[in-house]
Each structure stands twice: as structure tokens, then as C-alpha cells.
Image: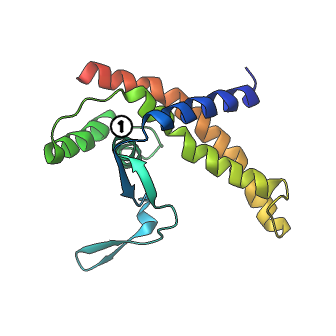
Amino acid sequence: MSCYDKLYEWTSLANKANRMLSTHLVISHKNLDPKNVICNLDDPMLIVWESAGYINTMHDLIEIALYCSKDETGNIDKERFFSFIAGYKKRTGEFQTDWAPVFENGFLGKLDWLEYNLKLSLWIECSDEEEQKMGTYHVIETIKEIRSYAKTIPLIVNWFDTEE
């Protein structure tokens, strides 16, 4: 299957999942990269809020759990992942979720980032050559990330199926 066909498939999955998950929304920062957290003594503060918006509660949980459970090589550490989930459950209580759509919804942010960078790369919304090159670089990296994410989804959904 071509890259174009896969992107179309992932977009379709993401849009369907997004419609399914359009209830139980919360407002979230949606970009908890360490560079977006500053500490004043022992008081952490979130900065850079341009990504903030509404997100499904389970999708928000998964996005943060995935981010926080990556090891030094970028792989998801199962123990870290489920430690994060267990901490959330301890705070909020048990929950039942169909995890596949939650993960499929995760394609949306990546596809939006891809679209943004395609516009830079193709000189559609680009002001100079440096910005165009940066867009091209991010297009390539984002496609790699989306492919990796697509391979990760069944693995982690299986983890949930065997854990619960």
C-alpha cells in the first residue's frame, strides 16, 4: 500500500475515532514536553499554551502516558506506561474504554503537524528558504513518526487486553 493510501486510511480512522470520542472532553495543555514546564522553586508552571484545547479524557491520558513512558531509545516502556495508568486510576477510579479508537484518534495531531509542514515544504505558507527546508525535514520525520505510531497501536491495545 502506498504512503498516500496509508495516510488516507489513517485520516479516515482518526476522523471516525474523533467523532466517537467527542464526548467527555476536557481542556488540556496538549504539549507536556519538558521544555514547556518551568519550575519556580518547587512550583512547576506550564508555558507555551498554543496547543491547548479540548480533548477526550482518555485520549489525553494516553497521549501523556505515551510521552512519559518512552525510554532513551524512544520505545514505549510497558512498566512505565502502566505505572502512569495506575497512578491515574488511583486518583480517578477504574474505567472501561475501547482503546483502539482512543489510539486511532492520536493520528489527528500528527496529521495536522504533517499538513502544516507540507504547506511550508511546498511554499504554500512559507516565507523563506530556511523555513521551507525545515518544513521538508519535518514532513519526512512526521511520516516516520506516523508509521511508527501505527505499528505501536496494536501492541499497546494488546497490552490493555492482557492487563485488564
Residue 164, given in percent of the width and then of the height, sits at 23, 23
The image shows residue 111, relative to residue 6, as above or below, that is below
Quarter of the view holding residue 75: top left
Residue at (26% x, 40% y) in the render = 85
**Image position of 111 (left or right of 163):** right
Q: Amino acid at mark 1?
A: Asp
**Image position of 141 (left or right of 103):** right
The image shows residue 148, relative to residue 164, as above or below, that is below
Callout 1: SS? loop
Residue at (84% x, 53% y) in the render = 122
Quadrant including the N terminus: top right
Residue 136 in view? no
Quarter of the view holding residue 46: bottom left
**Image position of 6 (left or right of 20):** right
Residue at (23% x, 41% y) in the render = 83
Task: Name the residue beneath numbered marker 1.
Answer: 77
Residue 70, given in percent of the width and then of the height, sits at 41, 44
Quarter of the view holding residue 97: top left
Q: Nearer the viewer, residue 131 or 88?
A: 88
Q: Residues within 10 Å of mark 1 (few under 14, many from 20)?
A: some
Residue at (76% x, 24% y) in the render = 2
